[in-house]
Amino acid sequence: MFKNFGFSGKSEYFQSKGASLDNGFFIILTSVGTIVFGLSCAFISSYEPIVTWSQFQGISGFIYFFISNPIIGMFVGVPMLIVGAIGTYKDQNKQNKEIDKLKVENSELPKIKSKVNAIQEELEAFKSKVIESHLDLVANWLKGLDKILKLDNNDRVTIYYENKEEFYLLQRHSRNPKYKKVHRQKFPLNQGVISKAFEDGEYLEILCPSIDDSPDLYKQFLQDTYEYESDKIDKLTMNSCRYLSLAIIEADIHVGVIVFESTSKNFFDTDKAKKIKGYCKDHQGQLSKFVRDMLKLDTEVKVKIAGLDRTVESDIDQMLKK
């Protein structure tokens, strides 16, 4: 009790009771007026006010006389009954208008939902077009990089970006159509050459056996060095044995990784690794912009769609609560 009531209490008992009395005031007034008027009519025929008055004295007697007087009860009961009836009628009339209004609003809900769905579809289509344009831009940049670094059909270059503790494939290029295909969009943060470069800034692999020389040694090397599972190795479309992965850095923060790989053991026999590092260093700002724009595009559209959903749901909730 002491925790519920008082200024610091959490109870709303009287508040809820008061709200109930407010809502049912006219109904209560009509009921009380009917009872008072009925009782007064029942006793008025045998009531003798002079005799009754002579039996009571003082203030308490006067109060009792006033309360028990059926004549006064009739004069009190009739106005209560009339006011209560009029109030109940007007209250019900207002409720009927509110119900009609809600019916009209509810009839608009399907149209609102249809409009929301159309807007969401437009946003998704817009998002797809913008992202597609961005991916085309990155693809063209990778094609230019391919020509400058003189990559061939055994080679591939891929850009990954980090988002919410996972790597996502941004864009990939290879002259070999088979190696260019994308089968996975998401990769773990703590596995493979992507992870090693993301942590250390760069990573070079020149010791991996070629699958052409020994499939078993190749498979075992990937399992021991990069913690690849056997079934995933079997599903690889490109069995690379040479890797160079470089972190994409923006404001001293690693935001992604660019990976060069080849199935040829001679990929780094010349000074190609040095050329790749120099080229990527000179274009670090462009690489980081590719990643930043992709993250921004993906996030902004999702936020807008989520915000639209919340707004519409709030409007619908408010309608239903009425």
Image: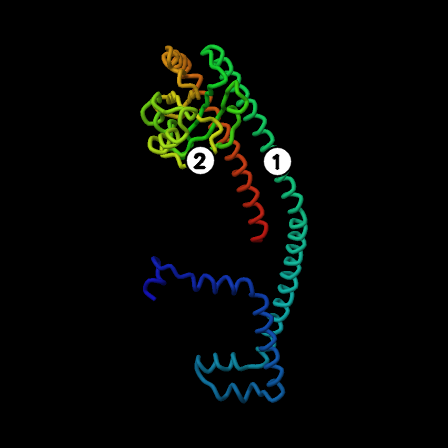
Q: Is residue 307 left or right of residue 207?
A: right
Q: Position of residue 189 (x, y in %)?
A: 38, 33
Q: How many marks?
A: 2
Q: Position of residue 217 (x, y in %)?
A: 37, 29
Q: Position of residue 35 (x, y in %)?
A: 59, 77
Q: Is the residue marked by circle 1 packed among few (<14), some (14-19), or many (20+) residues within 10 Å?
A: few
Q: Is residue 26 left or right of residue 190?
A: right
Between residues 11 and 26, which one lies in front from this camera angle? 11
Q: Is residue 46 above or below residue 257?
A: below
- Quarter of the image that includes the N terminus: bottom left
Q: Which tag is nearer the camera, tag 1 or tag 2?
A: 2
- Residue 286, located in which quarter of the rendered image? top left
Q: Is residue 75 above or below residue 182?
A: below
**Badge 2 element:** helix
Between residues 287 and 269, which one lies in front from this camera angle? 269
The residue to which callout 1 is attached is 121
- Residue 32, located in which quarter of the rendered image? bottom right
**Badge 1 element:** helix
